[in-house]
Image: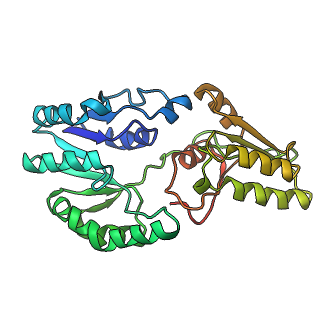
Amino acid sequence: MNIVVWWDFNCKAIVSVFTELNKIKDVNIVLISGSMKQNRIEMGWDEQIIKDCTHITLNDEEWIEKSEYFLEKYKDYLHIFNGFYYPERIYDIILLALKRNIKFGIFSEAPSNHYLGVKKGLVAIYHKYLLKIKTKHIANNASFIFCLSGSAPNEISKLENVGWVKEKIIPFGYFPEDILNIKYRNSNSVPNIFCPGNLVKHKGVDVLIKALRIVAKQGGQFHCHIPGKGPEMNYLINLVNKFKLNSMITFYGVLRQSDFEILQKKMDILVAPGRIEPWGIRINEAIQNGQVVIVSDKIG
């Protein structure tokens, strides 16, 4: 079986997706992706994340021009696109595939609304009334959609609401099948809490810090490790100083991937305290490392 996977930019989430795809007997996979985003490179990610397929990287300037060439070159392959309404350049290539009668499917999380305030209301209106008009022809002509949000009824219904029939919706989780390096923490040691990622408001790191202040006031012992950077970093450091938690919470900034992995293996508990965000690769990595995982009810 010959497959072309179109992914907007290099991302570690691709790894588990390709693990599943490579289970197909006699599969030949071509990955066409955009270049890795700068903030990912700064976190030490390798441009060549996927090594067991033909990987073609297109920069922003050549995306449309060369994508037309590759649609034609691989016109007899099954094409699978990462998204069907966003990112916009993936949407544009799907329209080109439709014109050429190329067989295709979709990888996508169900449409979600991660905004706050007025923008949240506008996005809700867009999803309810306009998105179906924009994407109905894609839903009608695609062979399937792998729902990366899983099999929860509310996620499936979000896709149905924008034009997908249930028969074409295939829940596609990307958890590791085997849990590796199962850990049993020494109960006599101080637990190591891990909260990696971009330090932005919707990640909710300040929520975690405020919760840890309560734990500390009640005599709880812990050490919280926060690698990453972002616009909230100074605010979060000031918050830790204000609560006098400096000896219990450490900020690392951006770590090289090798240093990040060394730190990650020492952790006992991963906390994802997001205000609103999709399921993250860091959660899957923690599960695979045999760590306890705590997430807010706004994750995924």
- The residue at the point 15 percent across, 39 percent down is 77
- The residue at the point 60 percent across, 58 percent down is 274
**Who is closer to the viewer here, 120 or 158?**
120
- Report whether 98 appears left or right of 79: left
Total count of labels: 0
Q: How is the image coloured?
A: rainbow
Give the percent coordinates (x, y) of residue 222. 83, 48
- Report whether 294 appears left or right of 112: right
Q: Which residue is the extreme one toward the left?
A: 100
Give the percent coordinates (x, y) of residue 70. 16, 33
Is 284 above or below relative to 72? below
Give the percent coordinates (x, y) of residue 69. 14, 32
Q: Can residue 106 be seen in the rendering of this structure?
A: yes
Q: Pick the quarter of the image with the N terminus.
A: top left
- The residue at the point 59 percent across, 44 percent down is 198
Residue 179: quadrant of the picture: top right
- The residue at the point 38 percent across, 57 percent down is 109
Residue 134: quadrant of the picture: bottom left
Is 10 above or below relative to 208? above
Give the percent coordinates (x, y) of residue 182. 65, 43
- Report whether 256 appears left or right of 216: left
Q: Can residue 103 be seen in the rendering of this structure?
A: no
Residue 44: quadrant of the picture: top right
Is 236 above or below relative to 138? above
